[in-house]
Image (cartoon, helix red, strand yellow):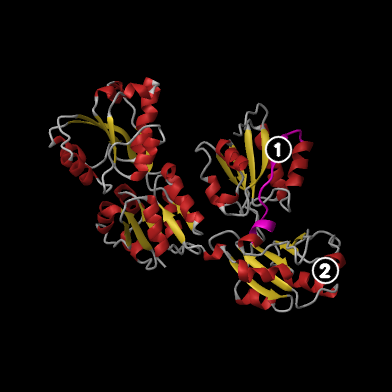
Amino acid sequence: MVCFVTMKPTVYLVGAGPGDPGLITVKAKKLIKTADVIVYDYLSNPIFINECEQTCKLINAGKRLGFKAMTQAQINNKLVSLAKSGFKIIVRLKGGDPLLFGRGGEEAEYLKKNKIKFEIVPGVTSAIAVPAYAGIPITHRDNTSSLSIVTGHEDPYKNESSIDWFSLSKSKSIIFLMGTKNLRKNINKLIFNGMSIKTPIAAIQWGTYYKQKTVLGNLKNISSKIKENNIKSPSIIVIGDVCKYRKNLIWFEKKPLFGKKIVVTRARKNSSTLVEKIYENGGEAVEIPTIDIKTIKNKKNDNILEKSDQFDWLVFTSVNGVEEFFKQYLELKKDLRYLGNASIAAIGSETARSIVRKGLKVDLIPKKFVAESLIQEFKKRKIKNKKILIPRASNARKILIEGLSKLNNDVKELCIYKSVLPSKKIQNQIKEKIIGNDVFGVTFTSSSTVENFFKFLNPKEVKKEKNIKYFCIGPITAKTLQTYGIKPFKIASKFTIDNLVDELIKTR
């Protein structure tokens, strides 16, 4: 386990990797989660910023080719200023690796000069990761055992190039980072120094992202192919016979959700599984949490929790119910053994897994993951005259309480959390991330996510986006969507995240 205990303000120069969220290091993720302030670049995947604490200050350095929200000098000064302002953990988040053409060395020197403590956290460099995702091994036993990594555009204020073009032209494997803008000029220098015009070359745009695009050619025709396929920055150029392997080694672009942007509307604390599965299958997960989870804690609830050992059954209807119940229960009672011998029922496999992770056995899971099915199971098993506790959301449907009560059970509802509207910041993002943004699908995992979604978007405006498909967990969520005049494209039959992802994958 990595633990960050720091007395002095420290600037961490952190590599965020090339884009795929799975390629960031464990140490980098932990720093993001504990950061007091993050200064991030354009090429850092925005998903990482979502993982910081709400109190974390975010500063967009915005550096990319042709645009700078802040100059390098301003960034250097900002890092020093933040350290002197009392922030303890300052994360300077950079795409790829901070030292490989990331100007991390310059920033480290400036921090040292100003007596600011710093640490360097290496990242997975795009020079290796992007060709790998395009099916190009940058070294290969049959072709080359060496590699040249070159900046695609040198400092424009240099009097002359510091690149040894004669030696570079003899290299069997070359990577140009940020190489599209000056490609024609760089190719001409290689040809002038003896490289064959038939040498294979690949241009890879948005490598490791769902919209990755790769074009193959040779030194003679690549410029026209790049123009024809509209390849722009950010791109990486690979030169050498290693490019020939792509034909047989394409893998990332064959993933089932490759090229698809999918909106996740779950509360952020619950969205990780769905988000991860979308990325694992090659898609892009756009997080728009239309609900937030707020704990309900009061004396009435404490009194019920104190007497929880008196119940014959505990019935959990959601993962949130499980997490909130055990969090408050352990704060109060300190030991799960005080629960007594209560049987446990769970609506849904995810809810059941959450209970099992607490070290407890689940005695009953209905075949269909809805309240009606659980009531039928209790009726079938003749479970009556029992004391039942149901920890759940304050705005949940009443059918479960009423149905179990009709079986002569003494049912107690424990409203332990409530679904609330997200922050203003998230509300403002919803429209810009949906309308005219090439979205393939929107996923809904509860009626609350549907209702809150349409509090910020006019259904008439959404209907104009003809290509968007809507995926729902279960018929109740689907029915809620239909009240807004929108037909679900698919309804997950088993009401699980895995089944929802299966429906996304099956849709071509």
- Residue 152 seen in render: no
Residue at position x 69%, y 67% in the image: 180
Give the amino acid type for the residue marked by disc 2 in the picture.
Ser
User: Quadrant of the image for the C terminus?
Assistant: bottom left
Residue at position x 65%, y 76% in the image: 225
**Lateral position of residue 99 relative to residue 333, left or right:** right
User: Quadrant of the image for the N terminus?
Assistant: top right
**Lateral position of residue 383 relative to residue 240, left or right:** left
Q: Quick one: label 1, few (<14), some, or many (20+) residues within 10 Å?
A: few
Q: Is residue 177 above or below residue 314?
A: below
**Which circle's residue, 1 or 2, is located before the other in the chain?**
1
Mark 1 lies on residue: 119
Give the amino acid type for the residue marked by disc 1 in the picture.
Glu
Q: Is residue 41 above or below residue 222?
A: above
x, y percent for residue 277: 47, 53
Q: Nearer the viewer, residue 70 or 221?
A: 221
Q: Which residues are magenta?
A: 114-130
Q: Nearer the viewer, residue 462 or 473?
A: 473
In the rendered image, residue 319 lying in the magenta stretch gets the answer no
Question: In which image quadrant can residue 65 be found?
Answer: bottom right
- Is label 2 in a helix, a strand or a loop? loop
Q: CA distance from mark 1 to mark 2?
A: 36 Å
Residue at position x 12%, y 33% in the image: 408
Mark 2 lies on residue: 169
From the viewer's perspective, is the residue at label 1 or at label 2 nearer?
2
**Lateral position of residue 140 relative to residue 466, left or right:** right
